[in-house]
Image: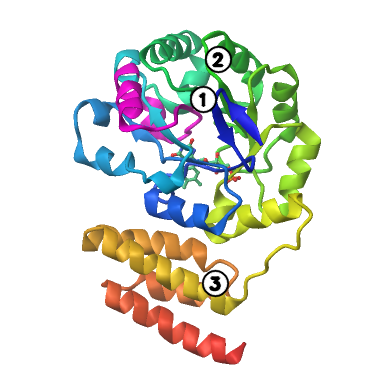
Amino acid sequence: MFKIRDVIIDPPLVLAPVAGHTDTLFRQVIKDLGGCGLVVSELVSTEGMTRQHTRTHHLTRFVEGERPVSIQIFGSDSGRMAESAAMVEAMGADIVDINAGCPVKKVVKQGGGSHLLRDLPLLEKIMKEVRKAIRIPLTIKIRSGWDRNSINAVEVMKLAQDCGVEGLTIHGRTRNELFSGHADWKIIERVKQQAQIPIIGNGDVFSPEDAAGMFRETGVDGVMMGRGVLSNPWLIRQCWDHLSGRPVIKMGLKQKADFMIQFLQRVCRNSPPPVALGKMKKIGGYLSRGFPQGARLRAGIHSAHSAEEFFETMESYLADKITAE
Ligand SMILES: Cc1cc2nc3c(=O)[nH]c(=O)nc-3n(C[C@H](O)[C@H](O)[C@H](O)COP(=O)(O)O)c2cc1C
């Protein structure tokens, strides 16, 4: 357990923000599986929020059962960032998180996400203005730096602390590394050693042993997991059981498949058909990782033209595999 001011994060395991995946439906399911002490929304554009784009309303939605919930905002205009943060507070979120790590070109070109790691005066202005605009806790999520020659996570953490930021998540890769190689847990350890605020470590936790290793090697207050949860939704629960000395639940193909079908049916019911089908393909692609002959299943679902075709493909694959199991 740790606290971000008065917000209790217990267990100290966090579901990462993952655009296109970790919407309210996904977050609710992860909370229900257990072990998750904090969820973070996908990144939400402050341009969109302050210009009232309907797409952002969908992104900021959450339900009581998800609490504590953090809403992540991104942008480069300090005024719009502050205005959006105040909107997030008014929606009843527990925490506002600033995205200073997104490596995607579209975001960086507009001066947001990881661009802020190489424009510290702008980052400082944003943090100060957002801090002034809200009373709830403010956190930030960063990468280790822009590139290997400009690793500045410790400096950014100190700046954030001075601006009244109350928690920091660090993904141990630089912007230019995108997702290549391995996350550098040493930089996470260095940030933690020098911080007075809670630090959440992130990057390459795919098993309960990885989570235990990150706590042990870096001393972080919390561990955040992203991609691992997309292909194994039970990961956070398994990490918590392992850390608490309980046996780790193992899921068979039948349980995974039932989960996948039930969850994707909810996705299907909750979005307009073309959006739903796209989402189902993306989420289904991750959830089927590790399935026997999963590539065949993925090829099938990716070429589906409708939700009916999607589920028929899944069911015929599963009928075949589960009888064979
Ligand atoms: C498809 C995708 C979308 C992501 N979207 C976001 C996002 O909206 N905000 C954010 O801070 N990080 C985002 N991330 C980064 C993750 O939160 C996390 O930092 C990264 O995946 C490393 O953690 P992992 O090794 O546990 O996946 C995204 C990552 C992926 C793969």
Q: Is mark 1 within 8 Å of ligand 1?
A: no
| Picture residue at 68% right of the left edge, 51% below the top | 240
Q: Residue at x 20, y 40 (%)?
A: 54
Which residue is the site of mark 3?
Answer: 256
Mark found first going from the N terminus, 2 or 3 = 2
What kind of residue is marked 1?
A: Ile
Q: Is 281 displayed left or right of 250 in the figure? A: left
Q: Position of residue 242 (x, y in %)?
A: 74, 54
228 is higher (above) or lower (below) than 114: below
Q: What amino acid is found at the position of numbered circle 2 in the picture?
A: Ala
Q: Position of residue 45 (x, y in %)?
A: 32, 31
Give the number of the disc on residue 12. none
**The C terminus, quarter of image:** bottom right
Q: Position of residue 194 (x, y in %)?
A: 72, 17
- Kindly indicate whether the residue at mark 2 contacts the one at mark 1 (C-beta within 8 angstroms): yes
Q: Residues within 10 Å of mark 1 (few under 14, many from 20)?
A: many
Q: What is the distance, in whole Å, between disc 2 and disc 3 at their CAs?
A: 41 Å
Instruction: Identify the residue under disc 1.
Output: 140
| Residue 210 appears in the figure | yes
Q: Nearer the viewer, residue 79 or 250?
A: 250
Q: Is residue 44 above or below residue 265?
A: above
Question: Dot 3 lies on which element?
Answer: helix
Which residue bears the numbered disc 2? 160
97 relative to 279 in the view: left or right: right
Q: Which residues are magenta?
A: 82-109
